[in-house]
Amino acid sequence: MNPLLDFTDLPRFDAIRPEHVTPAVTELLAAANEALERAVSDAVPADYEALSAVLDVATERLGRAWGAVSHLNAVADSPALRAAYNENLPRITEFHTRLGADERLYAKYKAVAASAAAQHLRPARQKALSNAIRDFVLSGAELQGPAKARFAQIQERQAELAQKFSEHVLDATDGYAYYASEAEMAGVPDDARQAARQAAQAEGRDGYKLTLQFPSYFPVMQYGENRALRERLYTAYVTRASELGEPEHDNSDVMRELLALRQEEAQLLGYRNFAELSLVPKMAESPQQVLDFLRDLARRARPHAERDLAELREFARAELGLTELAAWDLAYASEKLKEKRYAFSDQEVKQYFTEPKVLEGLFKIVETLFEVSIRPDAAPVWHPSVRFFRIERNGQLVGQFYLDPYARPGKRSGAWMDDVRGRWARPDGRLQTPVAHLVCNFAEGVGGKPALLTHDSVLTLFHEFGHGLHHLLTQVDDLGVAGISGVEWDAVELPSQFMENFCWEWEVLRRMTAHVDTGEPLPRALYDKMLAAKNFQSGLQTLRQIEYALLDMRLHAEPGSHERIQQVIDEVRAEVAVFPPPSFNRMQHSFSHIFAGGYAAGYYSYKWAEVLSADAYSAFEEAGVLDVDTGRRYRQHILEVGGSRPAAESFRAFRGREPRIDALLRHQGMA
Ligand SMILES: [Zn+2]
């Protein structure tokens, strides 16, 4: 039997082979298509349970099987698996696009919502139903005739333009090279020098090949002592894909057309601008609320940014002989100042964070605060280093998770949480408990010693575990809004960033660290330096993020902005930047988040979620960071409810008031 078609319990990761993929997808897609046809026919009444029993059962199977394939593609890549993945991905995408635009299905959902029984559905189901209808409307389901045709045309053109934008940025980045001399490379770290040397040699050239790829560009900006070289690279970097660079990579027209199309799309759907449309499924209520939020934060961060800059200027003048600080000196001077002030190395810190001790500490916090126990469990896995755990409360299974901790060939870099399956009171009466993947890329321990984690890696582990808890501790029984499903996009980082706070608590670190050789906990003096370095230039960094977020929000909230993009960015800089970049800086031309990613009128969400997580955590600071009662309330009001109600309501239920930005400012040393 094909293991991808076995849904009795956990995925059979040890048995799935590339040759299973296409037959399984073919069978599951056929079943899903059949379910769709049945769901929209008169055979299925306009009833939530009846519709779910037909359609959700089939699409969930497809999702679980494809999830297993995607997961293996990410953590155990092989040419055969990659081929099978790429062959089937368009089939999966096509099905979901068609499902999301099926007018008969939309009519069925509307009929369910209009039925007398709909008023008696439990709140989570009402939310899942209204989300489904909202998504159809935002995909143009209510449009008729020429408006509908135009909407489809706009979608298609936007996808093309986003792709063009990325290609221009990529080609402009790859198309640049400068061959530096030995003397020009002074100060650049060895690994970056060697890479540049090899790149030049590969082309049969002398010197060092520098490009605008980040690993080549940034070490020069950060460590390069040759100021003219820094200026040269900076200038090339910030004019990428603009009218000041190669004409064939100029994104000016792409940006103009994209913004105009987004405005038109919003108007077709009855909104005044694209920002309003973008915020419909988000936590923020209006563009004005976001603008006010960003400006308030800017006002409060400004004195700290001015102080950061004054310190940097003074240091650069006195110690580096830079009388006039330029944009291409910022990273360089900042690095020198940081080295001088907080001399410690990641290497030194790492010796105290052994993997078993860190995991034990993390589990202890979770067990204490959320009243669960975490125990080793068994399941088929894709690699012998992968572990599997179960979370229980009072002997009852709550959820399970895989932990794939180490980097290895064939595994994608980075760290992430992914769902294997969601909590669901299935139509057949069984309760399905949630399962999650936690994937990291730590370096495995050598010489019989445990893996040593940098503090950054510890933060990453806690962050991803926070996403995992959101998915695993849910008590919602409806698949579409259980765990992380249906959570607003600008609130989804709350539980993850929340967990990071523990990694900065002395009481936590003291117990979570043991030197790999001596067993000693982290020394207090080293901790104090880490904490001070954490907030280095937080004022400047905050204002930089606000500059990007304000630019994004204004471009999408002001009809006609496509005709004056440069003017908007100039105004934003005049308003918030304490160190305005040179007038030739064209960062907007490579701002892929908003022109080629999913962040259009959404860049603010980074800061927005940080405010929520810091403010939620401050409740623990007030009560004691391991206060069980506060942990229970956080779990019940935020983690367990998942996407079953608006995040703003969940936050108010936990905190007893609206979010405030004070805690974030305090955590970042800006109080
Ligand atoms: Zn995250």
Image (cartoon, rainbow, N blue to C red):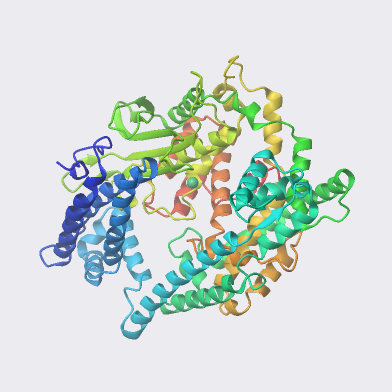
Q: Quadrant of the C terminus?
A: top right
Residue 44 occupies quadrant: bottom left
Quadrant, the N terminus: top left
The image shows residue 539, relative to residue 38, as above or below, that is above
**Furthest residue in direction bottom, as rendered:** 146
- Residue 242 in the image, given as x and y percentages of width and height: 63, 70
Residue most toward the left? 43
**Would you identify the image quadrant in which residue 33 lies?**
bottom left
- Left or right side of 134 for 165: right
Could you tell me which residue is drawn at 65 percent across and 43 percent down?
A: 192
Q: Which residue sits at x=34%, y=61%?
A: 131
Residue at x 64% of width, y 64% of height = 587
Residue 286 visible in the current orientation:
no
Q: Is residue 414 visible?
A: yes
Q: Nearer the viewer, residue 47 or 96?
A: 96
Q: How many marks?
A: 0
| Quadrant assignment, res 52 | bottom left
Please state the horizontal and vertical placement of residue 358, each as a whole percent of the image.
51, 26
Residue 111 in the figure: left or right of residue 225: left
Q: Is residue 10 left or right of residue 367?
A: left
Measuring 38% from the left and 41% from the top, which residue is drawn there? 75
Q: Residue furthest top?
A: 518
Residue 528 is situated, as x and y percent measured from the top left of the image, at 70, 30
Q: Is residue 621 above or below residue 487?
A: above
Q: Is residue 297 left or right of residue 450?
A: right
| x, y percent for residue 303 | 77, 53
